[in-house]
């Protein structure tokens, strides 16, 4: 295989893997890919003839369970585990996919059907690099303070003829940090709050990563009603201004080629999107691995 850096500057993180010959990707020992992924956190598979017909066959090699994506995203290619990314042309700030949810995917996959030429780049940023560049005061702040995500998650009833006069029904989700949980059968939503730290330990190297949903714009994700600290702190706004400045220094743009498949450690890296020019087409689909098989 040919191995090259996604970026050659100081923010370098992740590898682009390409075949030296027209080799079938399914003939390569997947342990080679796993070793690289554990170390780097991001892999772009390029020129491996991965296509819409076999991408799930490939992601299956690394997945023991897929995540349920948001209902607002339509399925693609006749497969319930393949979805569109969020529509629109606006820039999307850095975030870890569903990091506010009990169903927080370990791996995010992006497959490029149609690459834009001069805009709409996917952005990635290594949460470990961000954390290492925090001042001691900021590290201490996020290690001590938990974030509360106030959520409304839509669901589909298996029995559509269920009628209830009870607007809200007490509920629970078997996940640490979930509280104030209830079921709303009139709106078909589960409402709850989730308590979680903004810094987590990576399962592969035990390094701390700043990886969360704190930089997202609320109206871009309708499932998130509010984001706030468990204990109100006047320093939070000023600290987040510094966090965004540090994060922006280490953002990498992924310049897509048609047929690229990108594998991202979603509990180490955050991702986003640059603004898409109105005259450009962009077609990216995503797959979410809730639990890896390695």
Image (spheres, rainbow, N blue to C red):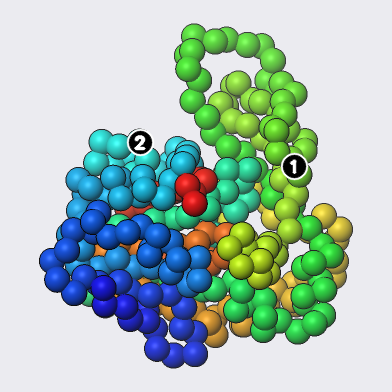
Numbered-mark total: 2
Classify mark 1: residues with Cα within 10 Å, few (<14), some (14-19) or many (20+).
Answer: few
In the picture of the structure, the residue carrying the numbered disc 1 is: 176
Q: Residue at (54%, 73%) from the top-left corner? A: 126
Query: Mark 2: few, some, or many residues within 10 Å (few <14, many ≥20)?
Result: few
Q: Who's the residue at 21% across and 63% down the image?
A: 48
Q: Position of residue 282 (x, y in %)?
A: 26, 62
Above or below: residue 118 compared with residue 66 = below
Viewer-proximal residue, 81 or 171? 81
Q: Quadrant of residue 111?
A: bottom left
In the image, is residue 213 above or below residue 14?
above
The residue under the point 48% across, 17% down is 158
The spot of residue 5 in percent (x, y) is: 37, 81
Residue at which label 2 appears: 80
Res. 95 visible in picture: no
Q: CA distance from mark 2 to mark 1?
A: 28 Å
Q: Nearer the viewer, residue 69 or 22?
A: 22
Whether residue 251 is visible: yes
Element assignment for label 2: strand
> Percent x, y for residue 81?
37, 40
């Amino acid at each position: 295989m040919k191995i090259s850096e996604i970026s050659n500057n100081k923010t370098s993180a992740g590898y682009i893997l390409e075949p030296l010959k027209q080799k079938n990707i399914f003939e390569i020992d997947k342990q080679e890919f796993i070793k690289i992924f554990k170390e780097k956190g991001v892999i772009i598979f390029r020129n491996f003839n991965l296509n819409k017909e076999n991408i799930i066959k490939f992601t299956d090699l690394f997945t023991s369970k897929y995540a349920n994506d948001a209902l607002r995203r339509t399925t693609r290619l006749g497969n319930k585990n393949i979805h569109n990314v969020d529509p629109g042309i606006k820039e999307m700030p850095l975030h870890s996919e569903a990091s506010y949810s009990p169903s927080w995917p370990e791996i995010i996959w992006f497959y490029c059907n149609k690459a834009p030429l001069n805009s709409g780049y996917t952005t990635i940023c290594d949460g470990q690099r961000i954390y290492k560049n925090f001042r001691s005061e900021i590290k201490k702040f996020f290690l001590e303070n938990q974030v509360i995500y106030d959520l409304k998650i839509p669901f589909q009833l298996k029995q559509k003829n269920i009628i209830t006069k009870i607007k809200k029904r007490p509920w629970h989700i078997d996940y640490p940090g979930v509280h104030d949980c209830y079921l709303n059968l009139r709106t078909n939503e589960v409402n709850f709050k989730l308590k979680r730290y903004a810094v987590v330990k990576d399962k592969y190297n035990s390094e701390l990563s700043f990886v969360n949903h704190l930089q997202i714009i609320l109206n871009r994700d309708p499932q998130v009603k509010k984001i706030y600290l468990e204990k109100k702190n006047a320093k939070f706004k000023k600290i987040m201004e510094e966090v965004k400045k540090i994060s922006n220094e280490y953002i990498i743009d992924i310049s897509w080629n048609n047929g690229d498949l990108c594998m991202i450690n979603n509990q180490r890296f955050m991702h986003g999107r640059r603004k898409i020019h109105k005259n450009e087409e962009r077609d990216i689909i995503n797959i979410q691995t809730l639990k890896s098989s390695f």
